[in-house]
Amino acid sequence: MDLLRAALLGVVQGLTEFLPVSSAGHLILIRSLFEWPDQGLAFDVGLHLGTLLALLAYFWRDWWTMSVGSVRDLWRHGFRMGAYGGESQMLWLLALGSTPAAVFGLLFDSWFEQHVRQPWLVALTLGAFGLLMLVADRRARLRRAIGDVGVTDAVLIGLAQACALVPGVSRSGATMTAALVRGFDRNSAARFAFLLGTPAFVGAALLKVRDLAAESNAQVGDLAAGLVCSTLVGFLAIHFLLRFLRTRSLLPFVYYRWGVAAAALAIGAIRVV
């Protein structure tokens, strides 16, 4: 792999991981479009480490406040969580919401890696889930803020996050869609989606970090280029989406998903002919 290709994949990862358009789906489609060989699991892990760094850099104050508050409340109140402050309760809700993705990932990640990475299937999933996003966005009540997240919300949004194991669904798209269905405003839906995604990225990195150690020295430069690009572009994508959703809907991303799905199916059909 050359540095330019590694950087391009890093840019794609950084953009599509946080915009509700599916990073896994785009990486599969781009590889198929240019007929590139698989970049390898270790490189994929490096790209995901980059987006994890973007999340931690953007939301470090939130995680610091929640962690300090949880330690303080645990010391003062023990396990009487009803007495905890809002920051502490949010941390436990994020832990609860992360459980479905962790369980499904451990049980089915390898199966999905082997059986649902075909470009045509990614295209269908992009289009179908775009329709779900459209319905959720159009019918959203937009009355609740992130401070209103409860146990039921955390579980349901966490289950939606687990669906992102299927390429083309999108982790941020699935969690934002579920949050909109639960009545949250778009900005709060996106913010909770990003916070909920952080433990999932940490878990995935810990499970697969050994693959990074197996990289040869000849690939370190490519890995570094992809990681740096995914981090920087990911940070900018988070900032853009949170500002965008204060006044705009998810409709542009729905149209984008449909456009990419149609183009991918058309290119696939032409190649078959």
Image (spheres, rainbow, N blue to C red):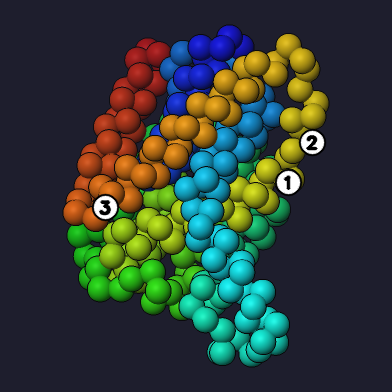
Question: CA separation, marks 2 and 1?
Answer: 8 Å
Residue 107, quarter of the rendered image: bottom right
Question: CA separation, marks 3 and 1?
Answer: 32 Å
In-front residue for pair 58/30: 58
How many labels sit on residues? 3
Q: Horizontal and vertical percent for residue 187?
A: 31, 58
Which residue bears the numbered disc 3?
245
The disc at residue 210 is 2
Q: Horizontal and vertical percent for residue 229?
A: 50, 26
In-front residue for pair 120/143: 143
Which residue bears the numbered disc 1?
206
- Give the mark nearest the N terminus, 3 or 1: 1
Residue 212, quarter of the rendered image: top right
Residue shown at 73%/11% (left/top)? 218
In-front residue for pair 202/36: 202
Q: How crowded is mark 1: few (under 14 residues within 10 Å), some or many (20 or more)?
A: few
Residue shown at 39%/21% (left/top)? 268
Q: What element carries label 3?
A: loop
The answer to whether residue 107 is left or right of residue 50 is right
Determine if residue 214 is in view: yes
The disc at residue 134 is none
Which quadrant, please, contains the C terminus? top left
Task: Kindly report which numbered mark, 2 or 3, lies closer to the viewer in this rendering.
Answer: 3
Q: Horizontal and vertical percent for residue 248?
A: 20, 51
